[in-house]
């Protein structure tokens, strides 16, 4: 039971939106890391049996160490280091001299015969090859005690001098010892004592300097460390290895320095790339969250992810030695600017360039060139009118010119410092110019594919929707001409106002074209169409509540038509939000007159909304109301137009209809001024809206009679339409009979 509950909780946790988003983030970062790192941080099959499989050209100037020559030099230096000697055995040698003295004294004191004493001294001293053997033995046996003591004292002093000089083991040979003793005897030794003292010292001297292995090894290591590495430089554009060439250790190191991992997986590099990609992705998402919330939808994020993935893949699969300036970065800039926004395009391309520069080890000049180009592209794309698709080709041409100028300026700076090949400058300038042109063509060709794949409407898609030959607009022209002309006027107002406040003018214009398509279901119930068909207002015979239901149903009817004709989702916002949750004031006032204020609630006469949540739909709400009101005034003066505009805006503000929109008071002021400048006399009559008389009724306590409400809404509408159609058919038949 506990296990099952734990499993269920785990499933719920994993299915939560935050966890799913986190997993998407981690997975995407892994994907981009794997693609980027595959070039420089994973194994690359470029060597087979020690032979290069292809030509490898240095993409940048490389300096690598010739390890073999450096190690050889280090070995030579280490061999020349002398062993480190340290003093030892000094006390032992001195004690041997004292022991020798005591032994001689003991032999002298013995009561044995002289021959026995000589025999013992011969055993004590090895004087077999000493020509002065007899003299030395005689001296040791027969000299007085004071002279003997003096000889040993001088020998002791001489020994101190010798020990200070040191006796290396390698120099411990008889001739060397004799020379050492001779050179270090005290100065006051008589000729008679020289032989004796030398014989005494020869008996006790042993090497007192031994090799300190640890110190010697340290000295060798220090000597090796002082050796400067032997460096080999490969200039940019120079071949590191040729196809079929044996790859030496030096060449393998050069390949690794160039980014070809021929030894092992570079986990540190892979982890670094992953952290960089993760941080950049989080930065991008944070920017969208705080500044571009509308683009946090899955379709926009999917498009951005696909663009980065494609770009990383292209960078990896480019042949070795290819110029990075052929990467279609301008295509990413243009597509992102069209489908997302120019600001997002600049940020996205900049982040891509950072990852590519670090992961692919491109030169900094590459990143600077395309970042500046992205900035220019952002500005250029934002200024086009999207009236013609060929405008994108012009953008590509302008970007190409800008790219050439940027590169020339950077190369001229380099020429002041280093010698740069003129061929390299010319080649890269040609590459970036052609790249920009081809990228613009690619962006133009791929736009319809991206539109259908990600369900994102572009300005070009909007321009196509704005074609008056579109089926719905053609129907609107024929079946509801008054609504059509109203929509045209409203679109003009919306486009001008949107452009004035920095909103999307194309979206505002096209959204206005379609905002009233729901009126196609019952066009004769809307007054702007009645004059075209010379019919009476059907609402004169309807209950106000029924009329309200007819009028307020057109946004929902419009959504049904939009789905039927496959209009993009963003157009739905204009259809649903252009009235917000506003009050159908005319029918509300009529209901109050007929039923009494106490029997009528405002909520019953409001549109279902929602309220406008973007600048363009909020502009449409105001333009729709203003156009209708001004047209109903017939020949209104400029002052009257301004008054009605101000009145409608204040009413919408006070009613809270603009509460969800991002419009500022400054925007509203600009919108009002734009409306006032554009509005002219209207072409069709409108019912002049009555003032809200609810307050008057309440004030004067006027009692109004109740009216029985019609319950069967659709039935009443059908009966009314049938009666009108029957009347028209009868009139047509009468006309035909007259002709006959």
Image: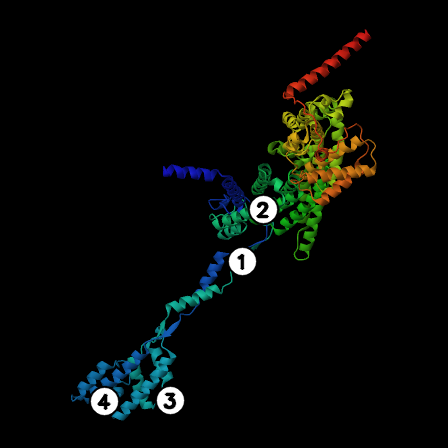
From this view, report whether residue 549 is shown above or below residue 646.
above
Which residue was labeled with disc 1?
231
Q: Which of the marked residues, 3 or 4, is nearer the chain's N terminus?
A: 4
Label 2 or label 4, whichever lies nearer to me, is 2
Judge the density around disc 3: few (<14), some (14-19), many (≥20) Cα neighbours within 10 Å.
few
Residue nearest the observer in this picture, 679 or 477: 679
Q: CA distance from mark 2 to mark 1?
A: 46 Å
Instruction: Give whichever of 680, 10 is nearer the camera.
Output: 680
Q: Quadrant of the C terminus?
A: top right
Instruction: Please report whichever mark, 2 or 4, sits nearer to the chain's N-terminal start.
Output: 4
Residue to which mark 4 is pinned? 141
Looking at the picture, tell me which residue is in the foreground, 28 or 319. Answer: 28
Q: Earlier in the sequence, mark 2 or mark 1?
A: 1
Q: CA distance from mark 3 to mark 4?
A: 25 Å
Asked whether, in this view, residue 248 is left or right of residue 235, the answer is left
Secondary structure beneath label 4: helix
Task: Give the distance between the C-alpha atoms of the residues marked 3 and 1, in whole angstroms.
Answer: 59 Å
Q: Is residue 343 above or below residue 571?
A: below
Q: Earlier in the sequence, mark 2 or mark 3?
A: 3
Mark 3 or 1, nearer chain start: 3
Separation of marks 4 and 1 at Cα, in angstroms: 74 Å
Q: Is residue 389 above or below residue 86?
A: above
Q: Nearer the viewer, mark 3 or mark 4?
A: 3
Residue 212 rendering spot, x and y as whole percentages: 37, 70
Q: In screen coordinates, is 657 left or right of 261?
A: right
Q: CA distance from mark 2 to mark 4?
A: 106 Å
Question: Callout 4: 10 Å neighbours few (<14), some, many (20+)?
Answer: many
- The residue where tag 3 is placed is 187
| Quarter residue 210 falls in | bottom left
């Amino acid at each position: 039971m506990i296990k099952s509950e734990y499993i269920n909780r785990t499933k719920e946790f994993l299915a939560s939106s935050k966890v799913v988003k986190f997993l998407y983030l981690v997975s995407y970062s892994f994907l981009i890391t794997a693609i980027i790192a595959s070039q420089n941080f994973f194994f690359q099959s470029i060597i087979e049996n020690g032979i290069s499989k292809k030509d490898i050209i240095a993409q940048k100037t490389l300096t690598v160490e010739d390890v073999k020559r450096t190690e050889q030099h280090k070995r030579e230096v280490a061999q020349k280091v002398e062993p480190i000697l340290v003093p030892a055995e000094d006390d032992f040698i001195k004690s041997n001299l004292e022991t020798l003295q005591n032994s001689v004294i003991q032999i002298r004191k013995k009561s044995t015969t002289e021959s026995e004493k000589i025999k013992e001294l011969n055993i004590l001293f090895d004087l077999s090859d000493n020509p002065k053997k007899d003299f030395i033995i005689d001296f040791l046996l027969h000299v007085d005690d004071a002279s003997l003591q003096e000889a040993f004292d001088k020998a002791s002093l001489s020994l101190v001098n010798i020990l200070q000089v040191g006796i290396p083991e390698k120099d411990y040979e008889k001739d060397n010892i004799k020379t050492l003793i001779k050179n270090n005897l005290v100065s006051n030794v008589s000729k008679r004592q020289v032989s004796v003292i030398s014989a005494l010292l020869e008996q006790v001297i042993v090497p007192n300097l031994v090799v300190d292995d640890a110190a010697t090894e340290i000295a060798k290591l220090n000597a090796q460390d002082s050796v400067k590495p032997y460096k080999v430089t490969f200039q940019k554009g120079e071949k590191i290895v040729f196809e079929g060439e044996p790859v030496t250790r030096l060449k393998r190191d050069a390949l690794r320095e160039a980014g070809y991992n021929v030894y092992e997986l570079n986990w540190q590099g892979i982890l670094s790339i992953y952290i960089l990609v993760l941080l950049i992705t989080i930065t991008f998402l944070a920017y969208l969250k705080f500044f571009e919330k509308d683009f946090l939808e899955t379709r926009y994020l999917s498009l951005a992810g696909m663009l980065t993935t494609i770009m990383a893949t292209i960078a990896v699969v480019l042949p070795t030695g290819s110029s990075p300036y052929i990467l279609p970065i301008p295509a990413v800039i243009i597509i992102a600017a069209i489908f997302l926004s120019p600001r997002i395009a600049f940020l996205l391309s900049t982040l891509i360039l950072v990852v590519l520069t670090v992961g692919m080890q491109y030169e900094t000049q590459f990143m600077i060139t395309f970042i500046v180009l992205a900035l220019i592209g952002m500005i250029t794309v934002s200024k086009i009118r999207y009236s013609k698709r060929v405008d994108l080709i012009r953008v590509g041409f302008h970007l190409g010119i800008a790219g050439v100028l940027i590169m020339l300026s950077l190369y001229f700076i380099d020429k002041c410092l280093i010698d740069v090949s003129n061929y390299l400058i010319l080649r890269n300038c040609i590459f970036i110019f052609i790249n920009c042109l081809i990228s613009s063509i690619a962006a133009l060709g791929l736009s319809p594919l991206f539109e259908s794949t990600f369900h994102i409407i572009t300005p070009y898609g909007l321009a196509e929707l704005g074609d008056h030959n579109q089926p719905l607009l053609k129907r609107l022209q024929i079946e509801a001409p008054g609504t059509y002309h109203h929509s045209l006027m409203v679109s003009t107002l919306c486009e001008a106002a949107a452009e004035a406040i920095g909103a999307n003018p194309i979206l505002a214009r096209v959204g206005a074209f379609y905002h009233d398509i729901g009126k196609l279901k019952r066009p004769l119930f809307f007054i702007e169409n009645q004059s075209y068909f010379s019919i009476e207002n059907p609402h004169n015979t309807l209950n106000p509540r029924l009329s309200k239901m007819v009028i307020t149903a057109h946004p929902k009817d419009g959504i049904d038509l939009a789905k039927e004709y496959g209009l993009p989702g963003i157009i739905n916002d204009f259809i649903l939000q252009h009235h917000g949750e506003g009050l159908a004031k005319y029918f509300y006032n009529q209901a109050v007159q007929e039923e009494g204020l106490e029997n009528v609630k405002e909520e019953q006469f409001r549109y279902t909304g929602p309220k406008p949540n973007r600048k363009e739909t909020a502009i449409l709400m105001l333009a729709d109301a203003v156009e209708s009101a001004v047209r109903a005034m017939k020949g209104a003066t400029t002052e009257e137009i301004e008054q009605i505009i101000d009145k409608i805006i204040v009413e919408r503000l006070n009613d809270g209809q603009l509460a969800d929109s991002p419009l500022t008071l400054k925007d509203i002021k600009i919108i009002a001024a734009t409306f006032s400048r554009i509005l002219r006399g209207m072409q069709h009559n409108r019912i002049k809206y009555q003032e809200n008389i609810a307050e008057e009724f309440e004030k004067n306590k006027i009692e109004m009679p109740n009216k029985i409400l019609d319950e069967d809404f659709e039935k009443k509408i059908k009966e009314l339409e049938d009666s009108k159609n029957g009347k028209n058919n009868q009139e047509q038949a009468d006309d035909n009979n007259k002709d006959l």
